[in-house]
Amino acid sequence: MHPAVVKSRFAPSPTGSIHLGNARTALFNLLLARHHDGVFLLRFEDTDASRSREAFIHAIQVDLRWLGLEWQEGEGEGGEYGPYRQSQRNDIYQAYFTRLERAGLVYPCFCNSEELAVSRKAQLNAGQPPRYSGKCARLSMDERQKWLSRGVKPALRFRVPRGRSVEFKDLVRGLQYFKTDEIGDFIIRRADGAPAFFFTNAVDDALMKVSHVVRGEDHLTNTPRQLLLLEALELPRPQYAHISLITGEGNSPLSKRHGSLSVASLREAGFLASAIINFLARMGHYYGHDDFLDLQQLAEQFDIDKLSRAPAAYDDSRLLYWQREAIRHADSGELWSWAGSGVHDIVPESRAESFIEAVRDNILMPEDALDWAQIIFKNELELDSEGIAIVQGADGDFFRFALEALVLHGTDFKALASEIGQRSAVKGKALFMPLRVALTGRRYGPEMGRLLPLLGTERARCRLEKWVNTR
């Protein structure tokens, strides 16, 4: 059963750019909310003051909007549960820290990082799961005061109840059980006074009425801690769905070589937003087909029960497949803008749509469009050795016939080719290949019926004349 209003969220830390894993998490949360006509919320978990940057907050919003992942509540949009930056919610957190302190559910911890590292190493060497020993939980009031009088600032630890089992139904992985005796008391406020992720993340989800949390499986072991906190604070718990991580070859962690790229770098490389969205939507979610879908269609067909537990393997060829599909489905105006200023400087605006429709099936990136713009609209044309061999291998009168056919038929390529074929008694590849190479310098490319009108009779004539009487 879903609550009356499904609300999901994306809660990045503004310490860097959004990479593919972040973008997929945001996408799945948006698709879930939109599928149920719910709310998609954006908040920033910026309690790490040393690494959080305003520039990243801005850049993340730019990337999300470019991808089409618009949020209805949160940063920049407002809402009744703000503020939506954790750095602005300290009074809220302090009130809940106080509640836990009064209930005796937390205690100050004076252990330093060196002590904790030694304890962790000893537990691992003994084959035990690393967890806090509970040393400071047993300090008397006098012992605590002694540490405080020395100027030592303590962290605040949550007392995990012993002998219990934390259970919850994960919407991807099914029923989950965690023994509290294996968790250990954990820090909810660091010694510098900054609230910890476990605490702020859980409290904000509850106070902001988030109904569903879709996040990576690397957060699965955080969930029992957060559920214990919510229980202690008498706050509602959301439903959790822990999705598989994106991996590289052989289920290895995703590296930059495999595509651990930022959304911004993919945009700068020339990928279309719709290509990235369709690519990510199939990584860990089963749609049952490879039809190109817009965001609304992806949301309509989204089913949280079809999120996979299996690792989602990154595949360059799949990203390129969706790029081709995105180009095929984009309108000409979008592709004209995407092609960029280099193309705009070469192709007359009056020929923009004709140019885009001519080259659409032969471009993957803006530089491909620029290449064809130069081939079609620049007078200089260079052939490689194989191209030269092709045109020189044509019958001696072939290009004379081509020039005469050009006078008769202009840029009607079908009529032009037919005329040349009849007069030179050649057909098929022997007819079309020399013509294509002489006119474009390429052995492959867009349909000549679309290219020749863009070339125009004068440019075509100049290119054909070059090969008259050339063997």
Image (tube, grey):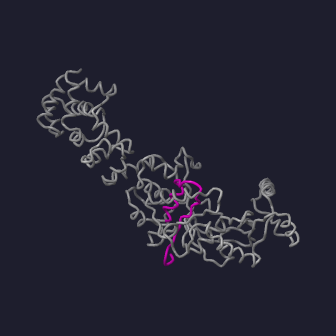
Q: Residue furthest left?
A: 408
17 in magenta: yes
In the image: residue 440, left or right of residue 256: left
In the rendering, at what x and y percent does residue 169 appear?
59, 70
In the rendering, at what x and y percent does residue 234 appear?
65, 79
In the image: residue 451, left or right of residue 53: left
365 in magenta: no
Q: Residue at coordinates 33% horizontally, 51% vertically from top-left?
A: 328
For residue 310, above or below residue 349: below
For residue 305, above or below residue 374: below
Q: Residue at coordinates 46% horizontally, 57% vertically from top-left?
A: 282
Q: Residue at coordinates 88% horizontally, 71% vertically from top-left?
A: 142
Q: Residue at coordinates 51% horizontally, 57% vertically from top-left?
A: 23
Quarter-of-image position of residue 301: bottom left
Quarter-of-image position of residue 37: bottom left
In the rendering, at what x and y percent does residue 433 appear?
25, 32
In the image: residue 332, left or right of residue 219: left
Front residue of this view, candidates 66 and 283: 66
Image quadrant holding the C terminus, namely: top left
Front residue of this view, candidates 256 and 64: 64
For residue 24, above or below residue 213: above
What is the tally of numbered marks visible in this picture? 0
In the image: residue 374, left or right of residue 99: left
In magenta, the rendered stretch is: 1-29
In the rendering, at what x and y percent does residue 105 appear?
75, 75
